[in-house]
């Protein structure tokens, strides 16, 4: 119960915390830095970590997480006693996370073995990120030669065909997949070599038509060289990322990796949401003001900025609800060149602000303060709407909510059926409110668009879920 009630907190404190970006500041590294902790010394209990940020993380967990053994005991006592489980003050010596109230309850808890190895891995990953070693896995490759095809079946062939330098450990692959999951989830879905196809039934016949329309703009006619010169005369491809949070503060050079999959496309990324980061002077915020950054307040009427980063990539960020700016795009939205992405939007979570007449919270997909007015606008455009989720349960919750939103239910057709995303982050993100809750950013993906003709059968949508006995 406790975890279920607090699960939305996992979304608010976005799994991709901003601290990761401090490792991405471009350095000249004339020589390799000397690591603070060495590769054979990555494990430290949080309270004894050499890094203040990790000690603070441990303290935050101690404040937020209840002891699971106390919690299960209290579940059997009467509610009127109002006793609360004790907080997690004891750090498991195997994984280093605060997991129980005391040594006794840690010893008593046979369940912890299910989580301990993953938590240990996450502990070492956090220390490795801060170790000060040269992070070769964050040194991203340049443009692809146009005769060299990129394979988008999974991360491993992606690393290989894109020429990533140093992906020989699981840990490097976890770090790099977390960094690149947002741009490559988009690229790996819309690219003509996507692993989501008709033959594996992830793409529907209607979806195949939608993607064919987009790909006619993203790529060049068969046989023609896919070069920067081929961008001439093609429309910009606009990707609207709604409800954007941490992904809006990913450095532009990381988003450039998306462009490198489409050498003849000019992308305009729009990050739109109340939690979108706006640029600050260097050193004082998650995204820096670049030479070409300019305010777009007058153009869009909301706090916003635009960076023409390269001839192939323009980025606009708007700190606003999409409903406030839709009118400015409404008449130009085109299924051949425009699309929407939602990264873990929480459609199926209860709204914190909007309630039905019976006092129950509305689901965010139907709530006037969240996505209620937005999805019908997007469906009317017929542009595809791509959605990710951080676990099978998260995907299922959002998909089920579609049928509970009056202006969405019956108004859409499937483009991509719900299931795993080959370009999800491979790193476990651990919840501060309960270290037993672990998710992976962009674990799954699905897509819909406004209905045009035939009604689709909705059976067996959940075939990706493990069978429940
Ligand atoms: Zn306890
Ligand atoms: Zn442990």
Image: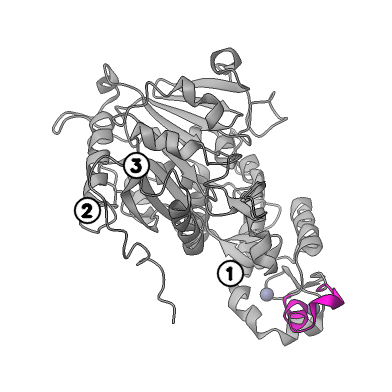
Residue occupying the far left of the picture? 223
Q: Earlier in the sequence, mark 3 or mark 1?
A: 1
Is 66 part of what is drawn in magenta? Answer: no
Mark 1: which secondary structure? helix
Q: Position of residue 399 (x, y in %)?
A: 44, 55
Residue at image position (31%, 63%) is: 459
The quarter holding residue 186 reads top left
**Which label belongs to residue 449?**
3
Horizontally, residue 355 falls left or right of residue 188, namely right
Above or below: residue 200 compared with residue 76 = above
Quadrant containing the N terminus in the rendered view: bottom right
Residue marked by disc 2: 198
Residue marked by disc 1: 118
Q: Earlier in the sequence, mark 3 or mark 2?
A: 2
- Give the magenta-colored segment's residue range: 68-85
- Viewer-side residue, 235 vs 174: 235
- Rendered-image quarter of ligand 2: bottom right
């Amino acid at each position: 119960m406790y975890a279920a009630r607090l699960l939305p907190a996992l979304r608010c404190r976005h799994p991709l915390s901003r601290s990761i970006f401090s490792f991405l500041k471009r350095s000249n590294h004339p020589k390799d830095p000397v690591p603070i902790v060495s590769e054979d010394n990555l494990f430290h209990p949080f309270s004894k970590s050499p890094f203040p940020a990790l000690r603070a993380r441990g303290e935050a967990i101690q404040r937020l997480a209840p002891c699971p053994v106390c919690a299960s005991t209290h579940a059997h006592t009467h509610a009127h006693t109002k006793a609360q489980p004790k907080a997690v003050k004891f750090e498991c010596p195997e994984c280093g996370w605060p997991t129980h109230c005391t040594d006794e309850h840690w010893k008593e808890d046979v369940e912890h073995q299910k989580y301990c190895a993953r938590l240990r891995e996450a502990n070492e990953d956090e220390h490795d990120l801060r170790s000060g070693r040269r992070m070769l896995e964050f040194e991203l490759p340049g443009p692809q030669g146009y005769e060299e095809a990129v394979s988008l079946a999974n991360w491993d062939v992606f690393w290989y065909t894109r020429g990533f330098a140093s992906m020989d450990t699981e840990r490097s692959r976890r770090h790099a997949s977390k960094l690149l999951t947002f741009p490559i989830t988009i690229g790996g879905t819309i690219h003509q070599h996507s692993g989501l196809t008709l033959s594996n039934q992830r793409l529907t016949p209607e979806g195949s038509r939608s993607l064919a329309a987009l790909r006619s703009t993203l790529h060049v006619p068969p046989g023609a060289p896919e070069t920067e010169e081929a961008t001439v005369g093609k429309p910009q491809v606009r990707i609207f990322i709604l409800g954007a949070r941490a992904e809006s503060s990913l450095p532009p050079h990381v988003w450039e990796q998306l462009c490198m999959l489409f050498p003849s496309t000019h992308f305009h990324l729009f990050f739109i949401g109340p939690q979108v980061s706006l640029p600050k002077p260097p050193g004082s915020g998650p995204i820096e003001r670049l030479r070409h950054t300019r305010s777009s307040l007058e153009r869009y009427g909301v706090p916003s900025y635009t960076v023409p980063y390269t001839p192939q990539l323009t980025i606009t960020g708007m700190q606003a609800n999409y409903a406030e700016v839709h009118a400015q795009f409404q008449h130009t939205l085109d299924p051949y060149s425009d699309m929407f992405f939602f990264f873990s939007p929480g459609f199926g979570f209860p709204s914190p602000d909007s309630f039905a007449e019976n006092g129950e919270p509305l689901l965010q997909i139907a709530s006037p303060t969240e996505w209620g007015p937005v999805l019908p606008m997007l469906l009317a455009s017929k542009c595809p709407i791509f959605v990710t989720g951080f676990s099978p349960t998260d995907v299922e919750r959002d998909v089920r909510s579609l049928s509970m939103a009056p202006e969405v239910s019956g108004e859409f057709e499937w483009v991509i059926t719900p299931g795993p995303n080959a370009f999800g982050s491979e790193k476990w993100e651990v919840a501060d409110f309960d270290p037993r809750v672990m998710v992976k950013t962009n674990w799954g993906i699905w897509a819909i668009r406004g209905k045009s003709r035939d009604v689709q059968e909705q059976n067996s949508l959940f075939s990706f879920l493990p069978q429940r006995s």
